[in-house]
Amino acid sequence: MPDTTTSAPNLQDAVIVGGNRIPFARAGSRYLGASNQDMFTAALDGLVARYGLQGEQLGEVVAGAVLKHSRDFNLVRESVLGSALSPTTPAFDLQQACATGLEAFITVANKIRLGQIDSAIAGGVDTVSDAPIAISDRLRSALLQASYAKTLGQRAKALATVRPKDLAPANPRTDEPRTGLSMGEHQAITTAKWEISREDQDLIAYNSHHNLARAYNNGFFDDLVTPFRGLSRDQNLREDTSLEKLASLSPAFGKSLSTPATMTAGNSTALTDGASTVLVANREWAKKRNLTPLARFVDAQTAAVDYVHGREGLLMAPVHAVPRLLERNGLTLQDFDFYEIHEAFAATVLTTLAAWEDDEYCRTELNLPQALGAIDRERLNVTGSSLAAGHPFAATGARILAGVAKLLHERAASTGKPARALVSVCAAGGLGAVAIVESA
Amino acid sequence: MPQDRYTSFVKSGFGKKLAKKLGLPQPVQLRRHTPGAPPVTGPVLVLSAGAGNAAGTGGTGSAASDADAVAGLLLNGLGSDETIDVRRSPHTAEGTRWGAVIVVTTQAEHPRDLSDAMLALGGTLRALASSGRVVFVSRDAADASSPAQAAVRQGVVSAMRSVAKELRNGATANALVLRDDATVTGTPALAALRFLLSAKSAFVDGQPVTISSDTGHVPQDWEKPLAGKVAVVTGAAQGIGASIAATLARDGARVVAVDVPAAGESLSKVANKISGTALQLDITSPDAGKRIIDHAVERHGGIDIVIHNAGITRDKLLANMDNARWDSVIDVNISAQLAMNEQFLASDRFRDAPRIVSLASTSGIAGNRGQTNYGASKGGVIGMVAASARALAEHGGTINAVAPGFIETAMTTKIPLATREVARRLNALQQGGQPVDVAETIAFLASPATGGINGEVVRVCGQNMVGA
Amino acid sequence: MTLPPIDRPGTVRELDRVPSLMALYAKALTPDPADVARLGARILPDALRPKQRTATIDDRHRSLPDVALKVRGVTANPQGLREYQNLLGFPRTEDLPAGYVHVLAFPVAMAVMAAPDFPLPLAGMVHLENRVDVDRTLTVGETFTVTAWASNLSGHLKGTRVDLIVEVSDPEGVVWRGVSTYLAKGTYTHGRGNDTGAAREFTPPLPTGSWSLGAGIGREYAAVSGDRNPIHLSALTAKAFGFPRAIAHGMYTAARALADARPLHGERYSWTVEFAKPVLLPEKVAVAITPHNAGGASYVGWNSKTGKLHFSGEISPL
């Protein structure tokens, strides 16, 4: 038996050294027939190729998918085995709805900080074009009973309970299980509550498309995106969209509310397929492989809100997470060079900002002495976000992280001063994850 | 690999008979390099032609010394520990198949001096092995001190071309042409002999390879001549570029595979197969050269070899040509290379015997209907290479071009069948080359041993009739 | 602690088991011989008319029988409970949702209404409102006693109201009490009441949820509740009773609201519902649940298209 107990190691820096994703495709289009595993393996292989990680045994690969087949119980590990990484690289699946990618990053970054691993890939993948379609609960129950039946009679009895309508497939639910409202309807309620205008939402969408297009045209994504199945840019991107075009679209959500419906297909994120990865490591690992640390993980916070009983909007959890994160790190909302606020809907970004600007709300709901205040909108989603790129649920986190890490590195290189970014991702179930990253 | 159905057909029992009866071309499967394979497959005969020299007998005096030196090189395994069966006499046991015949004419002074050696060579041709080799070692007519000397030197190259056209069964004939500063025992000559004798030069036929100096050093391991080198290959996502990347990696180089972002998916597959890194980049962007250097230096600690393989075609008769077609071909195929080379040459990281190999084309030499833009760009490459040789030489480096003929790639399978068949057969080997044939030639020019080959164009065309 | 006692009828008649709802419905929907007689009277020649019975219809309709029905040893069937929990969205635990206790006890109340001396016709009875007081949560292994009686016969603009009171007790006392208020439409025994009949003003709030109720939800609830009232089963059977399509069970909607608001109430609470327009299936019902600061919540459900109110209620700590 030992005479002394072991002591915890000192924390190390977890740094983002790069990332890779495949372009995001519109649902039922270019990636029809590609599985989550196909797409995530492609994203991994692109990353391996970019950073020369062939045959490397990484500390861990952590990712997930929101819409998952039951056969994909080990999706990430299976993807690793099919990739150019060493087959001795461990992996696991993780899921936190749309925050999956960010949560995967937080998980591996914390492991790296603790010295448990030296390197990792975090990421996510989702396809609605290859979504699982389940059999009905009654058919499933009958089949299970029949499979456990000991006699022919029992089996026949179990199967006899199946009715013709039970044979119809059960589509995956996209609405919140506890409220029966789709995410769009939920956001429409929050949008109405905060009286967000159609024009403001369209402007967010317009900026998203134009910022993303500019970034592509400037080659910003040359080392962030690897084409897949002949697609080399996000399919949802509308380089030529205008405020007039956006204004001409008819509302898609909130039509049954007593307030005017303001959310359209243009200012809401389309269903998309895609996969993304971000490479995280400690500084020593990066140095050994001649990789430049782009950004350092500072801290993260998750939060959840009670949307079921109308206390808060479904997608408002980041609003609650950010003040806790700011307080712990002694920062104000204005202390950031970049804000990456996931555009589930343009209105999500705007209700989030409106809430932070609202004195009364910040005092009563967030228990703050006053409003967090406004941000400089010029620093918001400067290379576009989900409205333009699309949002394959679990893939959004790593898309944002890899991009913002590059932005931070470039900013620090050009100014000679450190740069800092706030990342915010809302998620189904009233969840939200937020993180701070700084130039490394 | 794209299939040559005709070759498969005429190799089948029925097809073979039919082709013979009809007098159709009967291309053979060329021998190609496999790692560890010996440079030659049978005994090597060294003949010499010189003033007062009796063919094949070794002889005495200076006339024999270059041939002796070449035989000595062979006996020493061409710089490796391989055993090569070297003969100086064409008289040999019945049934012997010559792996190669080397005719050393460096010391010929007059066209008359050729006869013995040429006739001796002729006597061996029927006994030349399949995919056998004839290599002339000569000197450059440009350096001749007398008209007679110039005549014999020029004559050797032309004789070599005719021999190449006469050879069958995948055999090739080529010539090493030494300038004044180069010797037959110099490292570049050694490396060139190894290359031309080996299966790596399968589709190089009827070509003079000029060696201007003895610069270069023998690699520690001929299997890994590029060990420790960092090579950049543009247009590496597919076809010839992918093959170049794989060949350089096989030879020990760490490869940066470059292609346009849109080709990223196959680029990443290429990079992963060879444990290189993928760099998605538009080579026409103004900072392309700098970004390549940054990537290579940051990830791999340096940059030694650049292969300008990226190229496009936008064919159109000149009468119908538009701005976009003309400009894009010029931009990608030559302007980008000029701009990048400037950035490479300005970089202090591109100083240690750097190598640039640029892809020209037989169309750039001979011209091709509907390819005015392409021809201009590829001719431009040849001009650029010649003019840049001096700048590279300052750092012990070289710049050369490789001009492929008809190569079986995804691109050439798009050529209409009839045109493709003609293009394929219109060479001495009666078949199209493989991407790897281009890649092997590039690897040869990129190796540290070939510092004495600079500003040259080597054709990989199976002695194409076009532009000969 | 148990629920404070309330007045019970003087007589308690004990049944040996919970009666079958099917039998009760069959009885309720079989025409009353007296009604047949009246109908016959109009079409038959005088000679063939049956003799007038001695007790007049009016006498029978004026007062409620002073009797309670009681069943001991009532217990929940685990399979039935699970099906109820699945359909309504309650967690699959041993706990009996308050709405399921209603389901278990409801046949006893039906038996009260189906008794020959009950003054109102059972067929066409409309559920107006419901209140349940819960003292503690019952669990699946327990046996308990159900007592039911009618009370508070009163006039209404459209007929006559009556409360059906159901108590569930354990040896300590009453732990669950339901008061279901029904309206016998078109039967006036106590005048027209004070109700002016003015429809309540209703402006839909922002919803917190949405229920997509399929055409089969009535049948599904009938299967788990045993309440196979034809107005819930199909458009055809509903039409026979004057509804254009099948309508959702009121207690289905109230129990779903309870399930949705479940985390907001404690162990002891009351749960009320007031029914407005029936939910014609299939329909998308918009729901808003508003939590109370002091615990509990109010809830309201309306037609998401027309904005017409379906139901509203409260869940409050006791």
Image (spheres, rainbow, N blue to C red):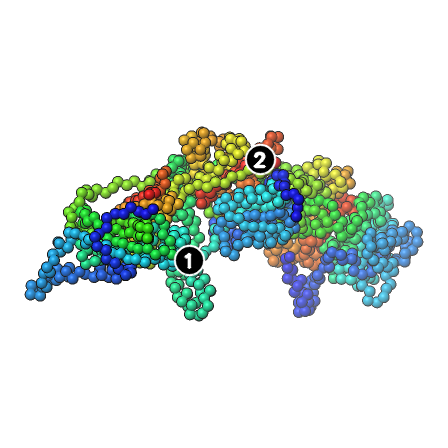
Residue C1, compared with residue A438, is above or below; it is below
Residue tagged 1: A137
Residue at the location (9% across, 63% down)? C51
* Residue at the (58%, 42%) spot, across then down: A109
In the rendered image, which quarter is residue C243 located in? bottom left
Under mark 1, the amino acid is Asp
Residue pointed to by mark 2: A438
Q: Is residue A316 visible?
A: yes
The furthest residue to the right: B60
Residue density around tag 1, few if under 14, some if 14–19, many if 20 or more, within 10 Å: few
What mark, if any, has residue B133 been given in the picture?
none
The quarter of the picture where residue B216 lies is top right
- Upstream in the sequence, badge 1 or badge 2? 1
For marks 1 and 2, give the CA distance.
48 Å
The chain letter for the residue carrying disc 1 is A
Looking at the rendering, in which quadrant would you find the C terminus of chain A? Answer: top right
Front-lying residue, B92 or C166:
C166
Q: Is residue B83 left or right of residue C265?
A: right
Give A80 or A144, whichever is nearer the viewer. Answer: A144
Q: Is residue B356 above or below residue B193?
A: above
Q: Relative to C36, is C250 on the left or the right?
A: right
Q: Amino acid at mark 2?
A: Glu
Local SS, label 1: helix
- What is the crowding at mark 2: few (fewer than 14 residues within 10 Å), some, or many (at least 20)? many
Q: Measured from the top left, where is residue A336 in percent x and y?
A: 53, 32
Q: Percent position (x, y) of residue A18?
A: 60, 42
Coordinates of residue B85 in the picture (x, y in percent): 84, 59
Give the residue at x 65% y 55%.
B408
Which secondary structure lies at badge 2? strand
